[in-house]
Image (tube, grey):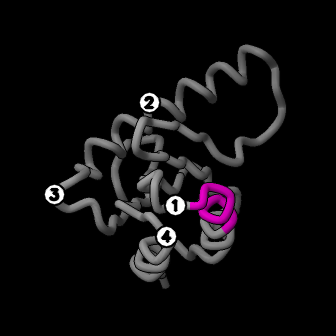
Amino acid sequence: MSNIEIVLKEAMQIDGAIGAALVDYSSGMTLGQAGGSGTLDLEVAAAGNTEIVRAKMRTMEALRLREGIEDILITLDTQYHLIRLIQGQSGHGLFLYMALDKRRANLALARHKLANLERTIEI
């Protein structure tokens, strides 16, 4: 039984959370989303960040890097955007996306909490 909605609601409890989504990077489709209303279009963010993940995967393959991506961080003037690739077998091909308000977020703590949430996802 899927717990995506619960995981995303918990992600929104992270200090500074603006929005969160679980995304399939093979299709760019969101499997669930929370927050973002009025400030962030999570569907557009999911599609755009899918391209980022794909590009990084291609680059790593070209470089023959045999490591897994834990997360990708994009730092804006007022926001952090975190892309956390799901490592578990049931989540292969998925990533958690989270936007945070830079003034209210603790980046290290947010990364830690997102990593913990990633381990609890049941698809």
- Residue drawn 56% across the image and 76% down it: 122
| Element on which disc 3 rests | loop
Q: Amino acid at mark 3?
A: Gly
Q: Which of 72 and 75 lies nearest the eye of the viewer? A: 75
| Element on which disc 1 rests | loop
Q: Which mark is residue 51?
A: 2
- Magenta-tinted stretch: 106-112
Q: Amino acid at mark 2?
A: Glu
- Which of discs 1 and 2 lies nearer the camera? The answer is 1
The disc, 3 or 1, on the residue closer to the chain's N-terminal end is: 3
- Which of discs 3 and 1 lies nearer the camera? The answer is 1
Q: Are marks 1 and 2 in contact (CB under 8 Å)?
A: no
Query: How far, Cα to Cα, is label 3 from label 2?
Result: 23 Å
**Residue that badge 1 annotates:** 105
Residue 40 among magenta residues: no
Local crowd at mark 1 within 10 Å, few (<14), some, or many (≥20)? Answer: some
Q: Is residue 2 visible?
A: no
Q: 109 left or right of 68?
A: left
| Element on which disc 2 rests | helix
Q: Are marks 4 and 1 in contact (CB under 8 Å)?
A: yes
Give the overall secondary structure of the magenta segment. helix
**Residue that badge 4 annotates:** 15
**Residue that badge 3 annotates:** 38
- Which of discs 3 and 4 lies nearer the camera? The answer is 4
Q: Are marks 2 and 4 in contact (CB under 8 Å)?
A: no
- Residue drawn 83% across the image and 32% down it: 66
Q: In this picture, is 85 found above or below 123?
A: above
Q: Amino acid at mark 1?
A: Ala
Query: How far, Cα to Cα, is label 3 from label 4?
Result: 19 Å
Local crowd at mark 3 within 10 Å, few (<14), some, or many (≥20)? Answer: few
